[in-house]
Image: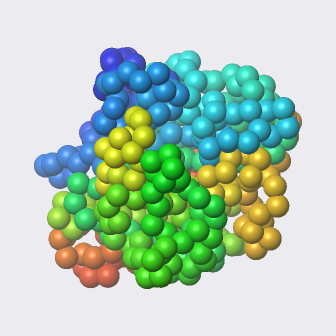
Amino acid sequence: MKSAKILGQKSYEIESDKVHAWVTETGGHVAPVSFRIGDRSVEPFSVAPWAEEHHGIAPILQVLRGDFFCMPFGGNDAPYGDEQYPIHGETANANWSVTRHDDHSIEMELITKVRPGYVAKHIWTEPGQSVIYQRHVVSGMEGPMCIGQHAMVKFKSVGQISLSPFEFGQVFPDEFESPKLGGYTSLKPGARFTDLNSVPANDGSLADLSSYPAREGFEDLVMVYAQRNTDFAWTAVTFPDEEYIWFSLKDPRILTGTILWHSNGGRHYMPWSSRHRGVLGLEEVTSYMHYGLAGSVADNVAQREGFRTYFDLNPEHVLAVNSIIGVVGCSSDSGPVTAIERTENGIQISTVRGEPIDVQLNAEELYRS
């Protein structure tokens, strides 16, 4: 069992022959992560440039890296009843206690305080598989709750973004950033869209969200909801120059939506100082936008369209949230991912060009209750 201070945070190491990862004690953030592809390694996750600076900021911002579990997901500026949560909840800010740790996996626990309850975290790797499995089990809580897995990918080169079929897409309806406070956005608030290639912008043009980095100097947030009545959904990024594909898999009955947070230097206030660039949040959630618990429970357009934006927790039952994130090599001319399908031994990834790519993994882990 190994722990060390990594980029300013006490972290725990897990690894296999294909993956080497660190998990922070504060917030349970997963990064840095190195995935092995053949005779090379790639590190897709971002780590905030201020990670080793000291600004007296919220724990989540000080730690900010990789992927982490949010409950309740979102900014949580408004209280829900007498519950006032920090950004993305206690799960993304508090210190987790380790209950088991070996070379390949870690189990942690958190006893929540704002709303008393218990969350168990299990993160693990498997031999021969270039993926990370995450499982969060929520118990002992009662009442509405929104949730999310908050992955952030650093684009060192141009990436091509693809999503499984979705029914509903919308730009953040309000002012996501305020110029008065030093924040800037480029997309038209509240605009609806059906294709990532054509999203209305403030200047009257149509922005292409299928390629990134783009719109330098802006922060933008959009959300889509996966097709209903399906039990498998995915998000993928092809990096032609680096010849690999990053992907995440989920059960859309548990994580109904995907948020794309484009962070490309649009925040000029501390600690961001326009330094957070070329980062894309690929966040699998059951929420409404970034509003937090109050906004996800209140009447909203996604609910009116028939999409779940929160769960009603019951202390007699558990809520299991499972996800799989991984990478696979590809050719430089493969093009964007067009489909990911389950197979007997994992998944098969299809792209615009090139042969289908088979990836070994345990897809059944998405459905463990």
> Measured along the vertical axis of the image, is residue 329 above or below residue 110?
below
Total tally of numbered discs in the picture: 0
Question: Horizontal and vertical percent for residue 239?
Answer: 26, 64
**Towards the viewer: 123 or 236:** 236
> Measured along the vertical axis of the image, is residue 214 above or below residue 295?
below
> Measured along the vertical axis of the image, is residue 10 above or below residue 198?
above
Q: Is residue 250 visible?
A: no
- Say whether residue 280 is left or right of residue 143: left
User: For the N terminus, which image quadrant?
Assistant: top left
At 73% from the left and 42% from the top, the residue drawn is 78
At 25% from the left and 79% from the top, the residue drawn is 354
Residue at the front extreme, as displayed: 180
At 49% from the left and 64% from the top, the residue drawn is 234
At 45% from the left and 66% from the top, the residue drawn is 186
Question: Horizontal and vertical percent for residue 262?
Answer: 43, 58
Classify residue 17 by image quadrant: top left
